[in-house]
Image (spheres, rainbow, N blue to C red):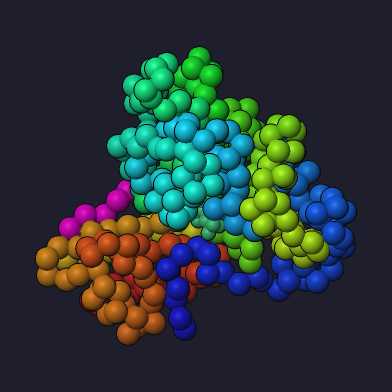
Amino acid sequence: MLIDFRSDTVTRPTPGMMEAMMKAKVGDDVFGEDPSINELENMAAGMFGMEAAIFCPSGTMTNQIAIKCHTQAGDEVICDETSHIYQYEGGGIAFNSGASVKLLHGDLGRINAGQVLAAIQPDDPHRPHTSLVALENTSNRGGGSCYDFEEIKKIKAVCSEKKLAFHLDGARLWNAMVAKKETPKQYGEIFDSISVCLSKSLGCPVGSLLLGKKDLIKKARRVRKVFGGGMRQAGFLAAAGIYALQNNIERLAEDHRHAKQIAGAVGSKQFVKMILPVETNIIIFELDESISAPVLVAKLKESDILGYAISPNRVRLVLHLDISKEMTERTIQVFNQL
Ligand SMILES: *Cc1c(COP(=O)(O)O)cnc(C)c1O
């Protein structure tokens, strides 16, 4: 029994999801004729109370399209220093949009309104032009940390006053909403664009959605084509997305419960120096000098448990759809015996 905690992207479609995919009605989505994609986009837009949505092959693409739509070359994007858009999208902000970034030192990936206000460039020809603020909820490098919704509202007020676009990288927004008992409509009211992944915690093989106003999504459709992301009969993938939105959101609470249970066992180990607060489905812990992250990961692998060394002394474990109660219990047992 292999227990794979490397990422919540490793899930395989369940029989129910496979059946939905096999039965999907499809057409050419570049012509706007794929009924399953149209259904998924309408369904997601409806959930968030937003005007429109566009289905894309990856979360990286949805984020990069949003940044491209909100900025001009020479603009500046404000985000946390650990954000996915800066750290893990191959320098895409510069490559695709010719924009620079203003990095803030947030609290476990979460920035606040005061920091954003102070980071806005003055209106001066020497300076880049600040045009976009991007948040990440949950924060991946923050160990799945969630924003306090009141802080998001305060940042929104700054964006409105200073006429800045406001984007949310919500790759794992589903986890945040389940953990904090929030609704998609709350988020839809605040942000100009929201990117959500279907391929992460929701168990789809492929796919992300970008949500926003009609004119923004119209522009996004053009940018998606330029980025090479216009797909044809991708309704098979959209059908998996529809299935996931209908069946796989509430169960995230189970992943969060499992994460807390495993974190309890991890945190009691002598060699674990620090463990980030476990709010959702991610566990990140730091090791003392007695063992390095790659060595611990190799040791866990001997017991068929896969983790990820995110730095020389930090390990990440991510809970997901394919981790059962039995696997959670087995993992706790292995940690207890280490
Ligand atoms: C995974 C992830 C993405 C998108 O990743 P893809 O692999 O391109 O789908 C974006 N933001 C965050 C925070 C992520 O964890």
Q: Percent position (x, y) of residue 243?
A: 73, 59
Direction left: furthest residue: 289
So how many labels did they put on this image?
Answer: 0
**Which residue sits at x=32%, y=57%?**
284
Q: Is residue 251 magenta?
A: no
Give percent across and percent down for residue 164.
52, 24
Q: Residue at 70% across / 38% down in the picture?
A: 219
Q: Quick one: 75 or 255, which is closer to the camera? A: 75
**Quarter-wise, where is residue 146 in the image?**
top left
Pick the residue in front: 64 or 24: 64
Residue 112's place in the image compared with 210, above or below, is: above
Task: State which region is magenta.
Answer: 273-279
> Is residue 273 visible to the viewer in this orientation of the structure?
yes
Above or below 13: residue 284: above
Quadrant containing the C terminus is: bottom left
Query: Can you give x and y, in whole percent of width and height, for residue 201 in the image?
Result: 55, 58
Of 41 and 57, the residue lying toward us: 57
